[in-house]
Image: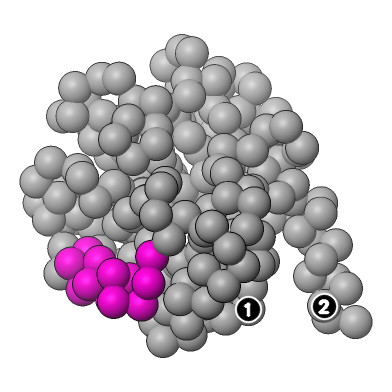
Amino acid sequence: MICVSLQSRTTQQTGEDVKRVGTEADLIEIRMDYRDEALDFAEIAEVSRVPLIGTNRRADQGGKAKEPEQERVLLLREAVKAGFTYVDLESTTENLEKVVADLKKDSATVIASYHDFKTPMDTVRLEDKYTELKTTGCDVVKIIGWTDSVLDNLPYIKFNNEHPGNVSFGMGEKGLTSRILAPLSGALYTYASLDEGKELGLGQVPLSHLREIYRRIDQ
């Protein structure tokens, strides 16, 4: 599956982008930490033709959320009640296990995520972080690390193969291999941007490019 990440600045802009995605992607991530106004989650959910992931990324995990922690999490719960299927929670979320449990009571599918923007992750670190996050009761573990070389992709691909249904790949220019191979090696999905220049992750590929790559692989 492919998930398109959207810089959700206004309700109108987000709704238009969601309509543009249509069913070309399998999931859409709404990055509410980019918002310039309060977002109408129900309106966004109504126009989407695929499941939505609500993300309000903390600054210490590469996001732009500025509100107090309780408020930040409350927005995610509001999104779920408005029709979002998934919530992405950072590993640094305060009282993470309780927040996971509360969101699951609201019928959310919870992704517990960790990002390392500086260091490539080896198999040992990936396994340790997986064990740590899995104990929170989340449904999906997402572990994203850096890549300095093409070989740094191998642990992420191995992780997906050994823990199918979760998500792992490398960031940066050298991480393209694991981004592309993530769903082919067992990951639940990988990420794409809606257009060139609208990337929310280092090394993200536009949706149209990623679809073309998969089309060629299937030939």
**Most prominent secondary structure in the magenta stretch?**
helix
Location of mark 1 (residue)? 184
Total marks drawn? 2
Q: Quadrant of residue 127?
A: bottom left
15 or 198: nearer the eye? 198
SS of the residue under disc 2: helix
Location of mark 2 (residue)? 217
Does residue 127 belong to the magenta stretch? Answer: yes
Which residue is painted at 39% across and 32% down in the image? Answer: 63
47 or 210: nearer the eye? 210
Local crowd size for mark 2, using a 10 Å CA cut-off: few (<14), some (14–19), many (≥20): few
Local crowd size for mark 1, using a 10 Å CA cut-off: few (<14), some (14–19), many (≥20): some
**Image marks 2 and 1: residues in contact by CB distance under 8 Å:** yes
The reply to whether residue 91 is in sight is yes
**Amino acid type for the residue under numbered disc 1:** Leu
Does residue 29 belong to the magenta stretch? Answer: no
Position of residue 210 relative to residue 56, above or below, is below
* Label 2 vs 1, first from the N-terminus: 1
Looking at the picture, the colour scheme in use is one colour
Chain part drawn in magenta = 121-133
